[in-house]
Image: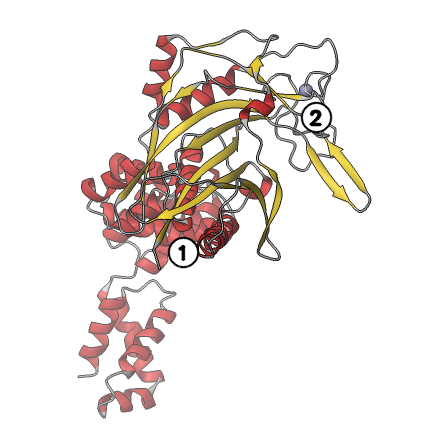
């Protein structure tokens, strides 16, 4: 039996986070709005109307092209893609065909074994979305709110070699579009969705066999399962002497099955032609250069810099660069307040992120700032408070909206380091607990931990636990 490898290419649609739609002033994000409330004659294709391009869409598309190392085209064109579907009232979609905003490019992303996989970008263009068809028993309902919502479509080369790798690519791409601020890519809200072109070949071969296309997936995990199932189906088909036909497939998430939708359209079926109602899209060389300069350090570069520049583990670096704002928070704290990188990473990953999860807030929504974190780290380092008070102080700062040092002062949270005060509490605890003291003296050394706990509790958590232990040991000698 031969061994096979998968050949996968992806088509990913991302909704751009502009305020208005691509060719009219209607609100772009209709999530939660009643059907057909964000529509106008332009996006519903009434006769006699003219589209006006939204400059923000063009800029965001160009920024993504830059991040993908593509050549941003100084002149590109809108084209009409003609097809009939009930949720497309115009009878065509305005897209870009042969001369699009981005040309070429690639995306490199880390795969499981720690190496990088380079995926070429075959197409990158901006276009408008179609409406939505809602299927009800015996009826089809149409919602045009999504008509004219700006999208960027990216088509990759057939460069991915397994369903897992394709899923990893989509995850990284989603991180990238969020990172550069062009979309929140919320897949549950349909703001990012993808199709997968799947074929198989004998390992080592370089031929491209006929492929099938799995349409409209909006979950990375479900997409991975669908691709796995399709790869398995194709291998079984070929091993049984069959041939793979170019089908378009639909993945049924509930039953975990693929079904045939229709034979795949070819580009000729769409009768593309230049959009006669719109001028060419132009970007000056200066503007293209500005976009290049405005691009932040990308997730992978930053991850590597965290490992090399700050000596952090790959685990910590991955977490800190999972989100652009979190990575900036880290850099701000370390660079502006000169805190230790590893200590800052620990506080940020364990305590600040823990608080964010509990409060369901993003880091930019917090009152808590890099300055506050640096201040708490300093309070612990200088011995004013102990670590557990510091952990509580992270949340108190956020809740009370005050400076950590002020809270320590107002609430008297300062660590008791005064040896006389500690000794006096230890004496009290020894007197109050003769049984435990007896046990300790008769050789049960572990009881010391319990006694330390009692002293800590009596001090309101403010005593220095190390000093308490030493004092108790001294007194019980
Ligand atoms: Zn409109």
Crowd band around label 2 with a 10 angstrom C-alpha radius: few (<14), some (14–19), many (20+)? many
In the rendered structure, the answer to whether residue 470 lies left or right of residue 199 reads left
Along the line of sight, the residue nearer the viewer: 18 or 196: 196
The mark found on residue 392 in the picture is: 1
The part of the image, by quadrant, that contains residue 158 is top left
Q: Is mark 2 within 8 Å of ligand 1?
A: yes
Q: Is residue 19 visible?
A: no
Q: Position of residue 153 (x, y in %)?
A: 49, 29
Residue 136 sits above or below residue 388 on the image: above
Q: Is mark 1 within 8 Å of ligand 1?
A: no
Q: Quadrant of ligand 1?
A: top right
**Quarter that holds the C terminus:** bottom left
**Quarter that holds the N terminus:** bottom left
- Tell me the residue that label 2 is attached to: 38
Q: Is residue 69 visible?
A: yes
- What residue is drawn where x is 54% and y is 25%? 267
The mark found on residue 200 in the picture is: none
Q: How is the image coloured?
A: secondary structure
Crowd band around label 1 with a 10 angstrom C-alpha radius: few (<14), some (14–19), many (20+)? few
Mark 2: which secondary structure? loop
Tell me the distance, in whole angstroms, between the alpha carbons under discs 2 and 1. Answer: 46 Å
Who comes first in sequence, dot 2 or dot 1?
2
Q: Position of residue 176 (x, y in %)?
A: 40, 35
| Extreme residue toward the bottom, this view | 442
- What residue is drawn where x is 50% and y is 48%? 223
Residue 363 sits above or below residue 44 on the image: below
In the rendered structure, the answer to whether residue 434 lies left or right of residue 267 reads left
- What residue is drawn where x is 27% and y is 83%? 446
Along the line of sight, the residue nearer the viewer: 240 or 255: 240
Mark 1: which secondary structure? helix
- What residue is drawn where x is 58% and y is 39%? 190
Q: Position of residue 333 (x, y in %)?
A: 30, 39
């Amino acid at each position: 039996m031969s061994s096979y490898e998968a050949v996968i290419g992806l088509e990913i649609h991302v909704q751009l986070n502009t305020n208005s739609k691509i060719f009219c002033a209607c609100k772009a994000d209709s999530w939660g709005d009643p059907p057909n409330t964000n529509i106008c004659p332009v996006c519903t294709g009434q006769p006699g109307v003219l589209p006006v391009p939204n400059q923000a869409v063009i800029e965001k598309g160009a920024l993504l092209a830059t991040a993908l190392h593509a050549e941003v085209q100084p002149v590109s064109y809108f084209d009409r893609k003609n097809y009939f579907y009930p949720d497309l009232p115009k009878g065509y979609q305005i897209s870009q065909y042969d001369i699009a905003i981005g040309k070429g490019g690639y995306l490199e992303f880390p795969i499981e074994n720690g190496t990088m996989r380079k995926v070429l970008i075959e197409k990158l263009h901006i276009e408008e979305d179609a409406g939505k068809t809602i299927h009800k028993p015996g009826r089809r309902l149409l919602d045009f709110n999504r008509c004219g919502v700006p999208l960027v479509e990216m088509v990759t080369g057939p460069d991915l070699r397994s369903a897992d790798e394709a899923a990893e690519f989509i995850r990284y791409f989603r991180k990238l579009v969020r990172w550069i601020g062009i979309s929140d890519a919320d897949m549950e809200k349909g703001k990012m969705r993808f199709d997968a072109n799947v074929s198989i070949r004998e390992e080592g071969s370089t031929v491209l066999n006929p492929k099938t296309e799995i349409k409209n997936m909006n979950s990375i995990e479900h997409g991975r399962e669908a691709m796995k199932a399709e790869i398995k189906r194709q291998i079984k088909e070929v091993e049984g002497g069959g041939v793979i036909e170019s089908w378009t497939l639909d993945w049924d998430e509930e039953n975990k099955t693929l079904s045939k939708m229709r034979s795949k359209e070819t580009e000729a079926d769409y009768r593309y032609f230049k959009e006669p109602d719109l001028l060419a899209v132009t970007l000056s060389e200066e503007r293209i250069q500005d976009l290049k300069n405005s691009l932040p350090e990308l997730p992978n570069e930053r991850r590597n810099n965290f490992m090399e520049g700050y000596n952090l583990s790959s685990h910590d670096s991955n977490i800190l660069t999972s989100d652009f704002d979190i990575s900036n928070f880290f850099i701000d704290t370390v660079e502006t307040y000169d805190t230790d990188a590893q200590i800052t990473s620990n506080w940020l990953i364990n305590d600040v992120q823990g608080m964010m999860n509990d409060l369901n807030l993003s880091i930019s929504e917090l009152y808590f700032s890099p300055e506050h974190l640096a201040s708490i780290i300093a309070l612990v380092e200088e011995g004013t408070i102990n670590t557990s008070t510091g952990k509580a102080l992270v949340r108190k700062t956020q809740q009370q909206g005050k400076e950590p040092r002020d809270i320590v002062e107002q609430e008297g949270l300062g660590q008791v380091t005064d040896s006389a005060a500690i000794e006096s509490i230890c004496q009290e605890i020894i007197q109050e607990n003769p049984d435990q003291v007896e046990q300790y003296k008769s050789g049960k050394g572990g009881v010391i931990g319990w006694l330390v706990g009692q002293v800590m509790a009596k001090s309101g958590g403010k005593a220095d636990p190390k000093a308490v232990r030493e004092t108790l040991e001294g007194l019980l000698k």
